[in-house]
Every structure is written in structure tokens, then in C-alpha cells.
């Protein structure tokens, strides 16, 4: 089968013929319909990214996917051949991943796509929506507290604003003025363009502003960030970090919320798997609103 791989000596991903992975007892083989290109995929395709993750030789790329179940292991319960599903793959060492013709994924990491949700657009959901959900899970219920989401118009931030607002948080979004409509439609009460001093009970730092974002947290408040440079806690601010993990049950709920219209799904465009290098170069250039999808 075909799979997009990264290998030493080049920062450009290559489409190669690889051997299909075997299906384990609790696994599903999914024929891929669409897979999103995320910045982490572009990073992993570079020499620096491979070094950070300790990768050597050829490894697969891609984590977000939708597709159709074509084979199920004997211990799988709840899925059948023909089901339309979405999943998040988080194994950067695998020889083939979501940017391929098919993938083998643990059934616990898979969720059915509900009726009414476009299976192509759904490929943009898993990684970023789960990152937002798991970040909010670290801070508990709103209980009258205020929340600032940095990068509120970005991939993770947009989901975080919508999920937090629906849970009863008083949400302020940090974003450009040109993104005001998106952020307000997501559910933010306020929009700011610059970080203030200590103002908010919680800051969810989807834009990875790090120490600058910590300064916007009130004394003894909470900062939630994503992997990257270490962030120092000051003034009693609790520092919490999200390492996004696959979760089929949570993904299923996020897909249902998407089908109900909670999220503003943004697709920048679709390209064939054979043109993946072009999509990677576009994402590497930054400034994208929405996800590019690879279609085998």
C-alpha cells in the first residue's frame, strides 16, 4: 500500500510503497477517506522533528483520519466492517500512519461518525478537538471563574472556546480583529487583541505564548499549556500541561457535538495523497485558517 513517510536526509515527505500492518485482536483496519495535515506532521517530517522524537529510518506521518472499517480483530466489540469512523493515531514510530491508503488502529481509539456529519470534514476534528477537550478537563467546572483562550481562532483554540462556552465558562478569546466573527460565533463573550496583566482565573494557552500567557493569570490561578518549552509558575499559578492522547469515547462525543453544529469546521482544501508534499509546504508556510486534507 502507499504511505507518506519521513526519512533521514530530507525535510520533504515521500510517498512510498510499504507493507500493510497486521490487525491485532483488538484492532481495526480502516480504509482512509481523508486525513488532516497538522503542524506536528510538518515538524515530524523535518530533520529537527525526527531528532526531537528520536526517530530513525523511515516512519509514517499523519494522525487525524476518517475512513471505513474493512477488517476487525476477533476481540473487537461495537464496530463492524463498513462502519464509517474517525480516529487519532499517536504512534510516531510506526512505518505507516494516517497519511496512507489504510491504517491499523486500536478499536479503543476509534469512534463512529454520526449521521449528518461530513466524513471528509470530520477528519479535521480528532487531534485538535481532543487537545481542547483534554485541556479543559484539567481545570474542572467553571464555578463562576473566568477563562482566557489564547489563539482563540486557531485549530485548538476554536474548539476550546466552543467547548468552554457550552460548559458555562465566561470565555474571553485572544485573537486578531479579523477573526472576531469566528471567535464570537464560537461562544466567546469578549475578544481581546493583547495579553493583559493578571486578570483571568484560568488561561488555556492554545497559542503557546508560554510565560507571556502566565502573566495574564491571576494569583493562585491556573495555566494550561501544551508540550514545548517549560513554563515557570509564579504568584502561586498552577501549571498544567496537556499531552493529547487517543480516546475513542471522548472523540465520539466530540463528533456528535460537531454533527449538532457546536463547532465551526474549517477546511482549507483537499489534495490527493500524491500531492502531499505540496500540502505540507503550504502548512509549513503558516497563516492557514482550517485544515488541508489528504485524500487517497
Image: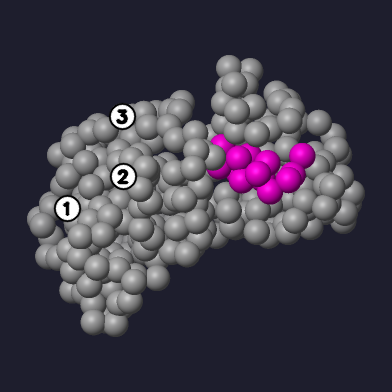
Magenta region, residue range: 157-170
Q: Which residue is mark 1?
A: 101
Give the crowd class for mark 2: few <14, some 14-19, many >=20 residues within 10 Å.
many
| Label 1 close to label 3 by CB (< 8 Å) | no
Whichever of labels 2 and 3 marks the residue nearer the N terminus, that label is 2
Q: Position of residue 26 (x, y in %)?
A: 30, 78
Q: In the displayed image of the protein, which residue is found farthest to the front?
A: 115
- Looking at the image, which residue is at 43% across and 28% down? 288
Q: Quadrant of residue 11?
A: top left
User: Which of labels 2 and 3 is toward the front?
Assistant: 2
- Looking at the image, which residue is at 59% across and 57% down? 134
Q: Quadrant of residue 171?
A: top right
Give the CA distance from mark 1 to mark 2: 16 Å
Is the residue 114 above or below the residue 277 in the image? below
Q: Position of residue 126 (x, y in %)?
A: 43, 51
- Looking at the image, which residue is at 57% across and 49% down? 132
**Quarter of the picture holding the C terminus:** top left
Q: In the displayed image of the protein, which residue is found farthest to the top?
A: 178
Give the crowd class for mark 1: few <14, some 14-19, many >=20 residues within 10 Å.
many
The reply to whether residue 207 is in sight is no
> Is residue 161 highlighted in magenta?
yes
Q: Which residue is mark 3?
A: 269
User: Which of labels 1 and 2 is toward the front?
Assistant: 2
**Main SS, magenta residues:** helix
Q: Position of residue 156 (x, y in %)?
A: 54, 43
Picture mark count: 3
> Is residue 28 highlighted in magenta?
no
Q: Which residue is mark 2?
A: 119
Give the secondary structure at mark 2: loop
Amino acid at each position: 500500500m502507499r504511505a507518506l513517510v519521513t526519512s533521514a536526509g530530507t525535510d520533504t515527505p515521500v510517498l512510498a510503497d510499504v507493507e500493510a500492518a497486521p490487525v491485532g485482536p483488538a484492532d481495526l483496519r480502516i480504509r482512509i477517506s481523508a486525513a488532516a495535515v497538522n503542524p506536528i506532521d510538518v515538524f515530524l517530517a523535518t530533520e529537527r522533528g525526527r531528532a526531537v522524537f528520536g526517530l530513525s529510518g523511515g516512519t509514517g506521518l499523519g494522525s487525524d483520519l476518517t475512513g471505513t472499517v474493512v477488517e476487525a480483530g476477533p476481540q473487537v466489540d461495537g464496530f463492524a466492517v463498513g462502519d464509517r469512523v474517525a480516529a487519532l493515531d499517536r504512534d510516531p514510530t510506526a512505518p505507516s500512519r494516517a497519511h496512507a491508503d489504510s491504517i491499523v488502529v486500536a478499536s479503543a481509539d476509534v469512534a463512529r461518525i454520526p449521521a449528518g456529519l461530513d466524513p471528509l470534514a470530520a477528519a479535521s476534528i480528532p487531534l485538535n478537538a481532543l487537545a481542547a477537550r483534554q485541556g479543559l478537563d484539567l481545570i474542572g467546572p467553571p464555578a463562576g471563574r473566568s477563562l482566557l483562550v489564547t489563539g482563540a481562532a486557531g485549530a485548538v483554540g476554536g474548539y476550546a472556546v466552543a467547548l468552554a462556552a457550552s460548559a458555562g465558562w465566561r470565555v474571553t478569546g485572544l485573537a486578531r480583529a479579523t477573526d472576531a466573527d469566528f471567535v464570537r460565533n464560537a461562544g466567546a463573550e469578549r475578544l481581546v487583541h493583547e495579553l493583559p496583566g493578571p486578570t483571568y482565573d484560568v488561561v488555556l494557552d492554545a497559542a503557546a505564548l508560554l510565560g507571556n500567557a502566565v502573566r495574564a493569570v491571576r494569583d493562585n490561578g491556573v495555566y494550561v499549556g501544551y508540550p514545548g518549552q517549560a513554563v515557570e509558575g509564579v504568584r502561586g499559578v498552577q501549571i498544567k500541561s496537556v499531552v493529547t492522547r487517543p480516546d475513542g469515547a471522548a472523540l465520539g462525543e466530540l463528533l456528535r457535538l460537531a454533527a449538532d453544529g457546536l463547532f465551526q469546521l474549517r477546511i482549507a482544501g483537499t489534495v490527493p495523497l500524491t500531492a502531499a508534499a505540496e500540502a505540507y509546504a503550504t502548512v509549513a508556510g503558516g497563516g492557514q485558517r482550517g485544515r488541508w486534507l489528504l485524500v487517497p
